[in-house]
Image (cartoon, helix red, strand yellow):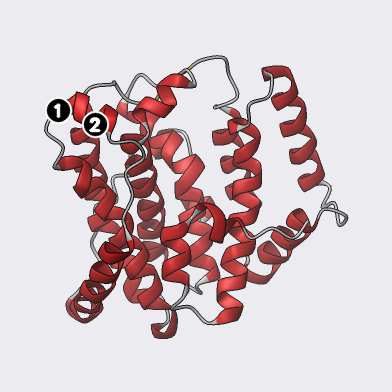
Amino acid sequence: MNKNYLSIYAKSFNWAGFFLPKNTYLDCSKLYDFCRTADNIADDQNSLELKNKIFYEFKEAFNKKDQNNSIIKNMWGLIEKFNISPKIIDDLFDGIHSDIKEEVKLNSKKELLIYSYRVAGTVGLMMAKILKVEDKNSLRSAINLGIAMQLTNISRDVIEDEINNRSYINANLETIKSTIFFADKFYDNSFYAMKKIPLSLRFSIIVARRIYRKIGHKIIKIKTFEEYKNSGKIFVNNYEKILETLLSIFDLIKLTTLNNDIIDHNHDLIEEEININERI
């Protein structure tokens, strides 16, 4: 099972990955392969019964460290190499399993944040560990980047999610745009994490952050909900990626002036249910 889902599904990340050393890119790719494989279980067009069966079989295989599954084997290699807490994987599984329902409906900001932490904040945290971030404040900022990107995904995919009986936010342009502005707070806080990433790895994540944030900024420019519905899957084209990559040079310089000692991470609602300190 030798798939590189990073190059297939995550074109923004794959673009940014060009700036990583090859070994680090491969480790990030192994992490993404694992997360995408787990996430695909919830997204595949199978019956609810079959999805649950496949999910529990995959989770059990992971817990048993199945060495015959290369994706699981690679993930355990990352856990041991970078001291990743298995509790983070448990959180990821909880988030994915919450999507395996006939209908998904989130009813509060707290539910939205906890869901976004579970399915994406966890990935940001694990990615930061692969990038050798050790500072706890910066690891929390890495969680924020994952949450911000998930809020961007949710804002972009309202129509697609509605077709699949998933409602993470209300299907109107006002709510979609307010979710983008909410995501911007997490993008802003995530910036502080970059300073603790080793210099040779830093630029890639700055680029990924800027390119993904651009998706939300494109949504903000949409005038009507009808226009939004007709836009399809909004993405950043190659010209825009080049521009955002060049602008990332200024972000790299700006980092040298930042102090990340005091940051409001907006984790209070999440920590009513999840002890983040146990994860970082």
Foreground residue, 231 or 276? 231
| Residue furthest to the bottom | 200
Q: Position of residue 217 (x, y in %)?
A: 19, 49
- Number of residue marks: 2
Q: Position of residue 221 (x, y in %)?
A: 13, 42
Q: Quadrant of residue 71?
A: bottom right
In the picture, measured across the screen, residue 159 lies left or right of residue 4, that is left
Q: Which mark is residue 224?
A: 1
Q: Residue at x 78, y 59 (%)?
A: 73
* Label 2 residue SS: helix
- The image shows residue 222, relative to residue 166, as above or below, that is below
Instruction: Name the residue located 61 percent from the left edge and 71 percent from the top edge.
Output: 26
**Residue type marked 2:** Tyr
Name which residue type carries label 1: Thr
On the image, the x and y values in percent for residue 198 come to 42, 81
Q: Dot 2: few (<14), some (14–19), or many (≥20) neighbours within 10 Å?
A: many
Is 192 in front, or is 127?
127
Kindly indicate the quadrant of the structure image that contains residue 195.
bottom left
Residue sitting at x 32%, y 25%: 169
- Tag 1–tag 2 contact (CB < 8 Å): yes
Where residue 237 appears, x then y in whole percent? 32, 58
User: Helix, strand, or loop for circle 1?
Assistant: loop
Q: In the displayed structure, would residue 203 be above or below residue 70?
A: below
Q: Residue furthest right?
A: 68
What label sits on residue 203 in the rendered view?
Answer: none
Relative to 225, is 2 on the left or the right?
right
Q: CA distance from mark 1 to mark 2?
A: 6 Å
Q: Which residue is mark 2?
A: 228
